[in-house]
């Protein structure tokens, strides 16, 4: 196995610790955790085995961090259609769930996914299937 020959800046550990406290995405958090352990001096293979990370992926993230900093640990934009359910739409749906369905013309006192989708479409113009509403 090849040895990593990278130099990390003196503030690499405090930067990673701060980043770990601030990040909300689980995938990015795991990457930062693994990179932090490598920066601390743990062997790449040991960190890879402990955190169940492919060593090739970990090597890639360590190199990206060394050359571009913590911002390189975030996901890059993906190709394909953007998700229909944005953060704002999910928040709107969360608020709607807390309301009484009877206030929105329902004949039932509990929401169904289909009724939520219908009311959401009426209020926002975004058509979601009942499965998409359930997944949120």
Image (spheres, grey):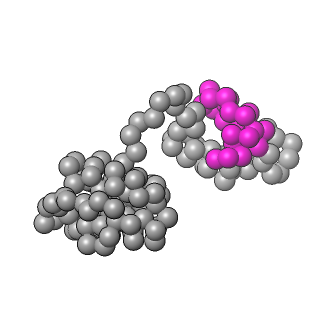
The reply to whether residue 104 is in sight is: no
The residue lying furthest to the right in this view is 107
Residue in the picture at 45% in, 35% down: 78
Between residues 126 and 2, which one lies in front from this camera angle?
2
Residue in the picture at 25% in, 60% down: 4
Relative horizontal placement of residue 18, taking residue 7 as reference (left or right): right
Instruction: Tell me which secondary structure the magenta stretch mostly adopts.
Output: helix
85 in relation to 122, above or below: below
Q: Position of residue 26 (x, y in %)?
A: 47, 58
* Location of residue 112 by image quarter: top right
Relative horizontal placement of residue 52, taking residue 21 as reference (left or right): right
Q: Is residue 13 magenta?
A: no
Between residues 36 and 45, which one lies in front from this camera angle?
45
Relative horizontal placement of residue 111, taking residue 20 as reference (left or right): right
19 in relation to 71, above or below: below
Q: Quadrant of the N terminus?
A: bottom left
Q: Position of residue 98 (x, y in %)?
A: 66, 53
Q: Position of residue 50 (x, y in %)?
A: 46, 71
* Location of residue 6 by image quarter: bottom left
Looking at the rendering, the stretch of residues picked out in magenta corresponds to: 113-136
35 in relation to 70, above or below: below
Residue in the picture at 82% in, 51% down: 109
Query: What is the number of callouts on the image?
Result: 0
Q: Position of residue 43 (x, y in %)?
A: 32, 70
Relative horizontal placement of residue 63, taking residue 120 as reference (left or right): left
């Amino acid at each position: 196995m090849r040895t990593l020959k990278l130099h990390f800046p003196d503030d690499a550990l405090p930067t990673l610790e701060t980043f770990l406290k601030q990040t909300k995405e689980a995938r990015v958090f795991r990457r930062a955790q693994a990179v932090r352990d490598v920066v601390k001096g743990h062997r790449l293979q040991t960190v890879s085995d402990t955190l169940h990370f492919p060593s090739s992926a970990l090597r890639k993230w360590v190199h990206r961090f060394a050359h571009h900093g913590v911002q390189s640990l975030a996901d890059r934009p993906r190709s394909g259609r953007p998700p229909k359910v944005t953060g704002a739409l999910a928040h709107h749906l969360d608020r709607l769930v807390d309301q009484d369905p009877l206030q929105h013309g329902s004949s039932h006192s509990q929401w169904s996914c289909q009724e939520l989708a219908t009311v959401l479409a009426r209020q926002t113009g975004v058509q979601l299937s009942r499965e998409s509403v359930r997944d949120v």
